[in-house]
Image (cartoon, helix red, strand yellow):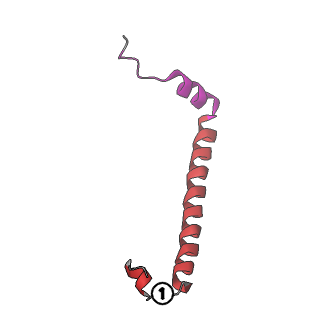
Amino acid sequence: RDYGNNGVNMADTMRSNGKIYIVVATIVSLFIGIVIYLVILDRKIGALEKNFPKETSNKSKGEFI
């Protein structure tokens, strides 16, 4: 086993060709897209919760007729 070889051939090749930046940009853009989607979804859920009428009947307390 050669534990002294810390280089990763694929990463070194992609870095030398400049393609590593495309991979990093793709991962970062996907992460940003997911974060933006979650923020928008949170705002929509918050608006629905604000507009949802509060239920004060006995059913909300777990009691059934």
Q: How far from the left and from the top, in percent, is residue 5?
A: 40, 17
> In front: 31, or 38?
38
Indicate the quadrant where residue 12 lies.
top right
Residue displayed at 44% across by 88% down: 57
**In the figure, is residue 8 to the left or right of 13?**
left
Depth check, front residue: 35 or 13 = 35
List x then y, in percent, for residue 25: 61, 46
Residue at 63% x, 34% y is 18
The amino acid pointed to by label 1 is Lys
Judged from the image, the secondary structure of the residue bearing numbered disc 1 is loop
Magenta span of residues? 3-19
Residue for badge 1: 54
Name the residue rendered at 54%, 60% in the picture: 35
- Is 7 a magenta residue? yes
- Pick the quarter of the image with the N terminus: top left
User: Is residue 61 placed above or below 23 in the rendered structure?
Assistant: below
Front residue of 26 and 36? 36
Does residue 5 lie above or below 14 as drawn?
Answer: above
